[in-house]
Image (cartoon, rainbow, N blue to C red):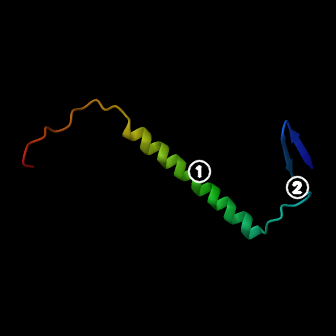
């Protein structure tokens, strides 16, 4: 299928039917996506905790400690 956008031309191939992946490849892809989503969730939680305002003062700093 050819797509024309102003000055750009691109060839796209579309496969009908089933995905051209084995069940093991699909499972690996799913695990990878889930891992990346969990990583983003952990990063967001860390960022929120790092920037959270706290209503208590920390212990005073003593020189030499």
Q: Give the Cα distance between marks 2 and 1.
A: 29 Å
Q: Check disc 2 and report the residue beneath it.
A: 13
Res. 24 image quadrant = bottom right
- Nearer-N-terminus badge (2/1): 2
Q: Residues within 10 Å of mark 2 (few under 14, many from 20)?
A: few
Q: Residue 4, percent across and down?
A: 88, 41
Residue at position x 6%, y 48% in the image: 64
Residue at position x 73%, y 67% in the image: 25
Q: Residues within 10 Å of mark 1 (few under 14, many from 20)?
A: few
Q: Residue 15, percent across and down?
A: 89, 58
Outermost top residue: 55
Q: Mark 2 or mark 1, which is nearer to you?
A: 2
Q: Residue 5, percent across and down?
A: 85, 38
Residue at position x 59%, y 50% in the image: 37
Q: Is residue 34 left or right of residue 43?
A: right
Outermost front residue: 7
Outermost left residue: 64
Q: Residue 14, percent across and down?
A: 89, 54
Above/below status of 44 relative to 22: above
Q: Is residue 31 left or right of residue 38?
A: right
Residue at position x 58%, y 57% in the image: 35
Which element carries disc 2, helix, strand or loop? loop
Above/below status of 55 relative to 2: above
Q: Check disc 1 and report the residue beneath it.
A: 37
């Amino acid at each position: 299928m050819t797509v024309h956008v102003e000055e750009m031309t691109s060839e796209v191939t579309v496969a009908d039917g089933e995905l051209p992946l084995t069940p093991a490849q699909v499972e690996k892809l799913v695990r990878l996506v889930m891992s990346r989503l969990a990583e983003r969730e952990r990063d967001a939680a860390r960022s929120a905790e790092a920037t959270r305002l706290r209503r208590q003062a920390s212990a005073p700093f003593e020189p030499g400690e």
